[in-house]
Amino acid sequence: PSPSQTLAGKTIVADAFHAPTRGQVEFLPAAAITLDPDGVIAKVSHDIPDDAIHLPAGHVLLPGLVDLHVHAPQFPQLGSALDVPLEDWLQTYTFPLEARYSDTDFAASVYAALIDHMLRAGTTTALHFATIHLPATRILADICMAKGQRALIGKVAMDHPDTCPDYYRDADADTSVAETRALIDYINHHPDNADRRVLPVITPRFVPACTDACLHGLGALALETGTRVQTHVSESDWEHAHVFDRMGMSDTETLDHFGLLRDHTVLAHANFLSGTDMDLIAARGGGIAHCPWSNIYFANAVFPLRDALARGLRVGLGTDISGGPIGTVWEAARMSVAAARMLESGTDPARAPQERGRDAARIDIATAFHLATRGGAQALGLDVGSFEVGMRFDAIAIDPAAPLGQIVVYGETPPLQLLEKIIYGATKANVARVWSDGIQRI
Ligand code: GUN
Ligand code: FE
């Protein structure tokens, strides 16, 4: 299939799965999904026009995956440098790597490789941290526009001289805010972005890396421009305690104090939130990027996902490239199920001390699938992630039998079992085609 083929105004016929509501998977056998001229789903039916496009037999259609937390510049160190705690990892490996993006040629080559990798893995929407460099961050936006990833992109703001090294830090708070504003203007007024598939995000790295003046200025900018916000929150014991010591309140309360906790603010990790923090995030309309792999490495922790969902927080999944060893949402989805099980282990009163685990922490595969698709989209406030009328057509075709894949299917397999096998086993090898806005990208 040649990329850039468009389904606009056409009908695609496929066996499809989606999870518009958390905990419930819907199987849509031989669904005829009709797109309007802009790539928005206009009809889901069984009416098959003569010029309909049919997926090959055995392939299934899923919504494109949503990665709620990516550090684009960290792609070169994916799968390495995970041997030290977060605060050392930043200083030893990550800040030196990110500083290299003052070189725009380096930025262009890494960012192109990353976006190709993500699209081939089926990630059609991503929320990206870039670096402090405005020129390189513009290049990331250009590449996402050209390759068709739906992307939200932030220039990282970090100006605190106590936590950020001299060689990798914004000159001062005014520079952080001015360059963030410049990126917002660049993306919002880009001639190739009329459909606004790429959006800017205000991105204070995390409270420890920003001065009060920087946080204050970015909060005012969010209010003025209505731009979304992303940051890290209560990720590790060190980070959580650092903010309490400096501010006399929690990380979450600090973000709210500076006007950064808003509708569709996405907070990465959030391992050590209190119940009060969670309720505040829910009240403000914020969401969590749940990064189960990274949480193991940097927090020795499992995010209390079920508690967060019960309190009404929006949650999606993040790879946190490269804060964990994984680069696909498939792997994040599998680990979200496994990590939730581990959190629940140890609650048997006959065997284990109660503090080891929590009751009712587990999630099922339907929930993981929802978080990987519609859940992530809802955290961002985007009309993607399911095959409902009015949604933009961001989708992937999966070939469960791809010869180089790891999905094992023998004979007749009930639909929900097939979906389970896909979530547990899919790799890039199984992703046969990828669309965003109805345009084929892979
Ligand atoms: N906290 C501040 N910066 C980072 C980062 O780059 N990755 C992770 N996982 N946590 C952070
Ligand atoms: Fe991160």
Image: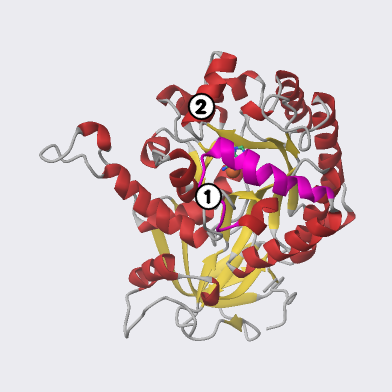
Magenta stretch, main secondary structure class: helix
Residue 347 falls in which quadrant of the image? top left
Residue drawn at x 73%, y 25% as measured from the top left: 161
Residue drawn at x 49%, y 41% as measured from the top left: 298
Can residue 23 be seen at all in this image of the molecule? no
In the image, residue 337 lies in the stretch drawn in magenta: no
The amino acid type found where label 2 is placed reads: His
**Residue 106: percent from the left, percent from the top?**
80, 58
Camera-nearest residue between 21 and 389: 21
Pointers 2 and 1 in contact (C-beta within 8 Å): no
165, above or below 123, in the image = above
Colouring used for the render: secondary structure
Q: Quadrant of the N terminus?
A: bottom right
Of all residues, the one furthest to the top in this rendering is: 248
What's the magenta region?
A: 78-102
Mark 1 Cα shell of 10 Å, populated few (<14), some (14-19), many (≥20) = some
Label tally: 2
Residue drawn at x 13%, y 37% as measured from the top left: 349
Residue drawn at x 54%, y 49% as measured from the top left: 376
Q: Which residue is mark 2?
A: 240
Q: Quadrant of the C terminus?
A: bottom right
Q: Which residue is mark 1?
A: 82
* Circle 1: element type: loop
